[in-house]
Image (cartoon, helix red, strand yellow):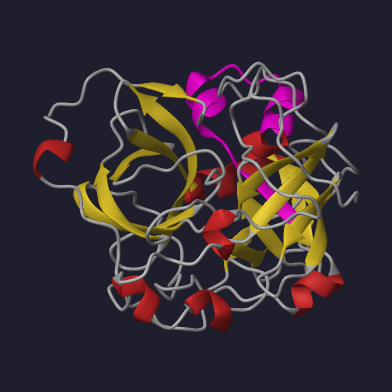
């Protein structure tokens, strides 16, 4: 990949934020925290984490630069799977099982949208880059790694001619097969929180506390806590409230529920509120298994137990920041 990654024109408002040449980390990973804050006195879990894993920056090459997003979790083939189908390339054929030793890094499908995308969240209509493209990954060790897009829900939905709005708007997952060099330094642990402890398959409830590691922005702390407002838009998306909300560059970030289970990835802004739309990972993986080429996958558990609150977190939304219920009609919009 080219080492010249720069700001993508603002006409596409889905994934990108500014980056220096050479796939440099954004300011959140390099700028010192203001003196006197509680975070400055704490050990840095990012420095103790493996080079590749939750929260690392992913760069999709575009003309004159790159789209920058954030990775969520690591995934591996479920037992007895090899990711191949009876019919070569045949969508909907039966799985045989998954490539032995394959390791995947999760991201948002919209981060691989085509260069002429029109900045919507409609994965059934927006132009998308083909599966198989190479993307860059910025390791926490300062090195650049690569991976190949083995699955992109937008590409698969378009190939199948999907029209169901629940899928078109809320099925937003890509899976990057790590190169051997990247897989060798991978660590599934979520910095600062530990876990994930597994996959949440029963959704989140209104008022449930949730957590997300979002390091690629200039904020006081990348360790966010917030509240799920449930799944009022349907089972494929969660409405999540954090202060501040997820913004461009955070796209694809993973979310943990109150038990440390991986349940979602950052996908959109839910207008007219400051809440985020978070794609349900369990349902997105089920779709990938049925129609993609990766077979059945499972979340790789963290090597460190889930233990939120060890480091200072963002403020839990309270008072005026909480939305009155019932929620207004919500419209998913690209992160800007």
Residue drawn 65% across the image and 58% down it: 25
- Is-magenta flag for residue 246? no
Q: Is residue 176 above or below residue 130?
A: below
Q: Is residue 290 above or below residue 182?
A: above
Can you see residue 308?
A: no
> Left or right: 223 with respect to 159?
left
Residue 269 position within the rendered picture, expressed as x and y whole percent measured from the top left: 42, 30
Among all residues in the image, which is located at the extreme front?
35
**Which region shows up in magenta?**
154-176
The image quadrant that residue 48 belongs to is: bottom right
The image quadrant that residue 130 belongs to is: top right
> Who is closer to the viewer here, 194 or 157?
194
Among all residues in the image, which is located at the extreme left?
319
Residue 277 position within the rendered picture, expressed as x and y whole percent measured from the top left: 41, 35
Q: Is residue 281 above or below residue 304?
A: above
Residue drawn 37% across the image and 27% down it: 270
Can you see residue 33?
A: yes
> Who is closer to the viewer here, 22 or 264?
22
Residue 260 position within the rendered picture, expressed as x and y whole percent measured from the top left: 36, 68
Residue drawn 80% across the image and 38% down it: 65
The image quadrant that residue 117 belongs to is: top right
> Who is closer to the viewer here, 98 or 140?
140
How many marks can you see?
0
Residue drawn 57% across the image and 37% down it: 172
Residue 322 position within the rendered picture, expressed as x and y whole percent measured from the top left: 15, 38
> Left or right: 153 with respect to 257?
right
């Amino acid at each position: 990949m080219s080492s010249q990654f720069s700001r993508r024109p603002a006409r596409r408002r889905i994934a990108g934020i500014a980056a220096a040449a050479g796939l440099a980390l954004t300011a959140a990973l390099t700028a010192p925290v203001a003196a006197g804050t509680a975070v400055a006195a704490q050990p840095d879990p990012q420095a103790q984490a493996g080079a590749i894993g939750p929260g690392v920056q992913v760069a999709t090459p575009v003309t004159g630069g790159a789209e920058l997003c954030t990775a969520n979790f690591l995934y591996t083939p479920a037992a007895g799977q090899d990711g191949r189908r009876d019919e070569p390339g045949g969508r909907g054929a039966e799985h045989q099982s998954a490539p032995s030793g394959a390791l995947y890094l999760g991201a948002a499908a919209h981060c691989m949208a085509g260069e002429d995308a029109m900045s919507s969240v409609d994965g059934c209509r927006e132009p998308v880059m083909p599966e198989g493209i190479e993307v860059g990954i910025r390791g926490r060790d300062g090195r650049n790694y690569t991976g190949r897009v083995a699955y992109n829900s937008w590409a698969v939905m378009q190939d199948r001619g999907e029209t169901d709005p629940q899928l078109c708007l809320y099925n937003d997952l890509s899976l990057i097969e790590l190169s051997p060099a990247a897989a060798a330094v991978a660590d599934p642990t979520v910095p600062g929180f530990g876990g994930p402890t597994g996959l949440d398959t029963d959704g989140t409830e209104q008022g449930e506390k949730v957590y997300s590691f979002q390091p690629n922005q200039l904020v006081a702390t990348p360790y966010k806590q917030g509240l799920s407002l449930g799944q009022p838009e349907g089972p494929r998306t969660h409405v999540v409230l954090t202060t501040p909300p997820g913004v461009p560059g955070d796209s694809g970030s993973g979310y943990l529920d109150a038990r440390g289970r991986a349940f979602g990835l950052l996908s959109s802004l839910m207008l007219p509120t400051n809440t985020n739309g978070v794609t349900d990972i369990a349902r997105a993986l089920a779709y990938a298994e049925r129609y993609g080429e990766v077979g059945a996958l499972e979340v790789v558990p963290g090597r460190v137990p889930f233990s939120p609150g060890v480091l200072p977190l963002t403020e839990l939304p309270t008072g005026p920041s909480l939305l009155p219920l019932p929620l207004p009609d919500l419209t998913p919009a690209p992160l800007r």
